[in-house]
Image (cartoon, rainbow, N blue to C red):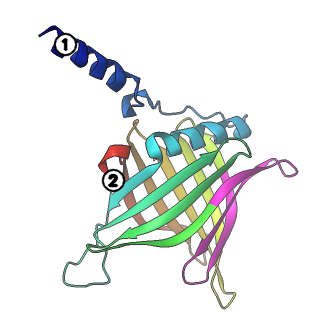
Amino acid sequence: MRTSAVLLLAALAVFASLPSQAQVAVPQFDEAQPEQSFREMARYLSADGGRWRADNPNYDEDNERSPPAFGLWFEWDSGIEVLSIEIVVYFPDRTVVSSSGGWLWHPGTEALDNTTKNRNGSLSRGTTEFSEPSTFTTVATLYGRSGKASVHRDVNRLTSASVHHNETFVALPDGSWHSRGVFEWHREPAGER
């Protein structure tokens, strides 16, 4: 009995020392300190393995090219201060990386640069700003393989330790923004992959 109690206490001590989603606080960004806000954004997104999943609201199970979900895989290199991202597509039988890129602080322009290269050959380049305490917004130009460009905006609202919302917009010729959809991203605990 005593050995069982000791083993149980040892297991509880190990479990309590593991990182937990509950320990991930929603950052409070400061527009006046974008470089520090970037570090907080990176730590939040990459915590607990840095993987997020969102259901595809337009999923069509009869269409083999329609994925049931999407993923965001983040990795923070605090040594060189680069936040990497892979955007993935979850199909029932496989996972495909659709684009890869990242963010880095540009000391010359004092801006947070974002670049993403897509599987289809397109390239997205833009900047990210922190205009609200738990929101970051990226405005980027997407260049197609032919060189044709369109402007996009992604608004990301961090709502809890394990949920954030993303709304994507495209710029219309009159300068207004058209929503292309909202995704609710859920953190995937490292042990559940």
* Point 31% across, 73% down: residue: 91
Mark 2, other Cα within 10 Å: few <14 / some 14–19 / many ≥20: few
Q: Is residue 44 left or right of residue 79?
A: left
Residue 1 vertical placement versus 169 (above, below): above
- The N terminus - image quarter: top left
User: Mark 2: which amino acid?
Assistant: Arg
Name the outermost residue toward the right.
108
**Location of mark 1 (residue):** 3
Residue 193's tag is: 2
Name the outermost residue toward the bottom.
146
Name the outermost residue toward the left.
1
- Work out whether residue 189 can be spotted: no
Residue 59's tag is: none
* Point 28% across, 69% down: residue: 68
Q: Earlier in the sequence, mark 1 or mark 2?
A: 1
- Alpha carbons under labels 1 and 2: distance apart: 33 Å
Provide residue 190's location: percent of width, then percent of height.
38, 45
Question: Which element type, helix, strand or loop, lies under badge 2?
Answer: loop
Provide residue 165's location: percent of width, then percent of height.
41, 50
Magenta part of the chain: 102-128
Residue 12 vertical placement versus 158 (above, below): above
Seen from the viewer's position, the closer of residues 96 and 121 is 96
User: Mark 1: which amino acid?
Assistant: Thr
Q: Is residue 56 left or right of residue 18?
A: left
* Point 65% across, 39% down: residue: 39
